[in-house]
Amino acid sequence: MPVKKTVDLTLAFSPGKDLLKKITAFVREKVASGAVLKITVDPKILGGAIISFQGKYLDGSLKEAILKRR
């Protein structure tokens, strides 16, 4: 049985059912088909998302964008 690929996703809020379906479809199309999402809610990121997959990390959070502009 193949090992499921897990994509870690951090959001500032808990996504509703419709948004979760859209995120899942996007991740499976662009990142890894058949991927399983592990969602963490962290209001400290303010908005956007942080994604981690197979040792790669992308911080697209609003908090990171604000910190970069300082």
Image (cartoon, helix red, strand yellow):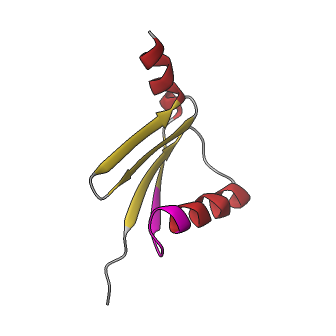
Residue 8 appears in which quarter of the rendering? Answer: bottom left
Of 60 and 42, the residue lying toward us:
60
Task: Judge from the rendering whether residue 55 lies leftward or rightward of residue 8; answer left or right.
Answer: left
| Above or below 60: residue 32 | below
Residue 13: image location, x then y, percent: 60, 41
Residue found at the very far right of the displayed protein: 18
Residue located at (38% from left, 65% from top): 6
Residue 48: image location, x then y, percent: 56, 37
Residue found at the very far bottom of the displayed protein: 1
Residue 54: image location, x then y, percent: 29, 59
Residue 37: image location, x then y, percent: 47, 62
Residue found at the very far left of the displayed protein: 55
Residue located at (60% from left, 58% from top): 23
Q: Quadrant of the N terminus?
A: bottom left
Q: Verify whether residue 59 appears in magenta.
A: no
Residue found at the very far front of the displayed protein: 30
Residue located at (49% from left, 36% from top): 60
Residue located at (70% from left, 60% from top): 17
| Above or below 48: residue 18 | below
The count of marks equals: 0
The magenta segment is 29-38
| Above or below 54: residue 36 | below
Residue 70 appears in which quarter of the rendering? Answer: top left
